[in-house]
Image: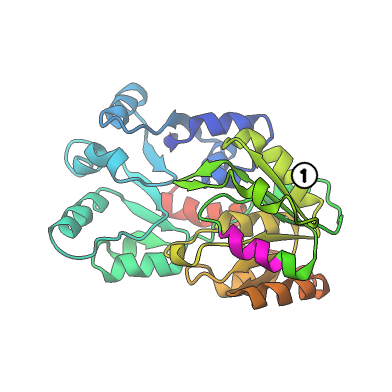
Amino acid sequence: MKILYIGEETTHNQYIKGNVPSHWFYGACEMEHDGHDVIWAQEKSNILNDLKLIYKHNPDIIFIPNLNIHNHLLLLSIARSIIRTPIYAYLHHEPKIKEGLKSKVYKYLLGGVKHLFFLSEKSMFATINAGLVEEKRCSVPGWGPDMDFYSNVEKSDNGWFVSTGKENRDFDILIDAFTKSGAPLHIITAYTHNGEDYSSLTDKCKNIPNIKVTIVDNTSANYPMMLHEMASAHAIVCPILPDRLNYCVGLSTIADAEGLEKPLIITANPYHNSYRVSLSGISVSCVEDWVMAIHNIRYREKQPTHYTMASAYSQMKTIMEL
C-alpha cells in the first residue's frame, strides 16, 4: 500500500542515520518496515502543498502525524468530496474552540479525517464531548518508545539528573529544587522554543556548583548527544510550566525514560496517564515535592513499559486496515 506521510521529512533523514527513534514518526516507520511504500513528504503552510503531493504520488492513504488544521485547511475542506483518499492523523491538542460558528467549521474539517489518533484520553474525550468528532472515529493507541532503538543504547549511572526538554519548561522550579537538594543536575535545552527564551539559563546557574547547563541549537541533530546524557544519567527530570498543562506536554520525555529504563520525575499533568507515569517515576507539583522526589527516586525500582511504538502500531494497523 502507498502511504503519503506529511510531516517532518528532514527529521526522517536523522532516523535513516540511526540517530533518532521511530516513535518520532508516530507509526510511519513501522508502516514502512511492514512492507508498505511510505512517501516521506514535508508539511508546509502552503495551502496547495497537500494537493500537489497527492497529485504527484496518488497515494492509497494519507497519514499526518501531527494534525495542524491551518496547514491542511484545503485538504480537509475537500476531503469528503473531491479528494477521497482516506486520511488518518494524530491530533496532539484538543481544540480550544468548542462552541459557536468556529467550532462548527472545526467539526466540518475534522470530518474529513477518517480516524483520529490521540496521545491522551483526556484530549480525546474533551474533543468528543464537545461534539467535534464522533467517538467511533477516535482512539488512543498508546504511543510509546521505539524499544529496538533504545536496546542498542549503552546505559550507565553517573549519579546525575538530566533535563533535556525544551517545550514549555519550568526551569525556575527545577533550579530552586536542585539548589535546595544539592543533587547534581545537567540541563540541556535549546536557546529558544515556541516563544520561550532559555538563553539566560547559563548565567542564572553559573554560581550554583551542582547545576550544569548546556544550550544547543533547536535541531534533531543534537539528539544523539542528549541521548548519551540521558542514558548515562541516574534519573531524568521534566519540569513543565504550571500554566501550560493543557495538553500532554512532557510525553516525549516519558517515552525516553521508558525506553532507557530510567527513573523519572515529572510535573503532574492531567493529560498524562497517571498509571503509566507511576511505572517509571514520580509526578510532582511544588518545590517541596521536587526535593523529596530527588532524594527518594534512587530507591525506586525500574519498571518495564507497557507502552511501545510496536504495540501502538499494532492497534493503528488494525484501524487503518494495513
Name the foreground residue: 124 vs 201.
201
**Residue at point 59%, 28% (across, down):** 13
On the rendered image, what quadrant is the N terminus found in? top left
Relative to 70, residue 276 above or below: below
In the shown orientation, is residue 218 left or right of residue 177?
left
In the shown orientation, is residue 77 left or right of residue 219?
left
Secondary structure mostly seen in the magenta stretch: helix
Position of residue 288 measured from the top left corner of the image (x, y, whole percent): 66, 77
Secondary structure of residue under mark 1? helix
Relative to 201, residue 296 above or below: below
**Residue at point 55%, 33% (across, down):** 11
**Residue at point 40%, 42% (across, down):** 64
Which residues lie in the magenta part? 170-177
Three-letter amino acid code at the position of disc 1? His
Report the number of discs: 1
| Residue extending farthest left | 101
**Residue at point 48%, 61% (across, down):** 248
On whether residue 296 falls in the magenta region, the answer is no
| Residue extending farthest front | 207
Within 10 Å of disc 1 (Cα), the crowding (few <14, some 14-19, many 20+) is some
Position of residue 31 measured from the top left corner of the image (x, y, whole percent): 53, 41
Mark yes or no: residue 306 visible.
no
Which residue is the site of mark 1?
A: 228
Name the foreground residue: 262 vs 200.
200
In the shown orientation, is residue 158 left or right of residue 251?
right
